[in-house]
Image (cartoon, rainbow, N blue to C red):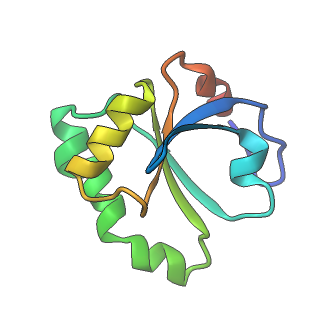
Amino acid sequence: MIKLGDALPDVQFNVPGPEGMKPLRTGEIFAGKTVALFAVPGAFTPTCSARHLPSFRDHLADFKAKGVDVVACTAVNDHFVMGAWAKDQNVFGDILMLADGSGNSLALSV
């Protein structure tokens, strides 16, 4: 389990954006920021769409008030799916969607 102060493994995520996919490495996302990162089993799954992602969307202001710079969601989906899910859930631009189609971010939980 990663603890406060631990270095994060170097992982590449594919992030959907208005101009298409942008590859970002762990350091670009987390360095010098307070990030609330959560992972879900998959985009568009019933519980993740009904409860998981909406609960973070509904508490964005609370996270920001506590000093969180970025709220980020990762799942083992490609950036097309993560982008479509962000639009469907009305979080595009509010929650950073970290697509990890290869499951490389699983190293973040080790």
- Image coordinates of residue 19 in percent, x first then y, are 48, 46
Query: Residue drawn 33% across and 29% down?
Result: 42
Quadrant position of residue 57: bottom left
In the image, what residue occupies the spot 42% across and 79% down? 61
Q: Which residue is drawn at 28% across and 39% down?
A: 84
- Image quarter hosting the N terminus: top right
Q: Nearer the viewer, residue 1 or 35?
A: 35
- Judged left or right of residue 60, residue 84 is left
| Viewer-closest of 29 and 37 | 29
Q: Position of residue 24 (x, y in %)?
A: 67, 40
Query: Vertically, is 15 above or below 103?
Result: below
**Residue 52 x %, y %:** 29, 48
* In this rendering, position of residue 96 left or right of residue 24: left
Vertical placement of residue 3 versus 41, above or below:
below
Q: Which residue is drawn at 72% across and 64% down?
A: 33
Can you give x and y, in whole percent of width and height, for residue 3 in the image? Answer: 74, 47
Give residue 107's quadrant in the image.
top right
| Nearest the eye: 32 or 82 | 82
Q: Extreme top residue here? A: 102
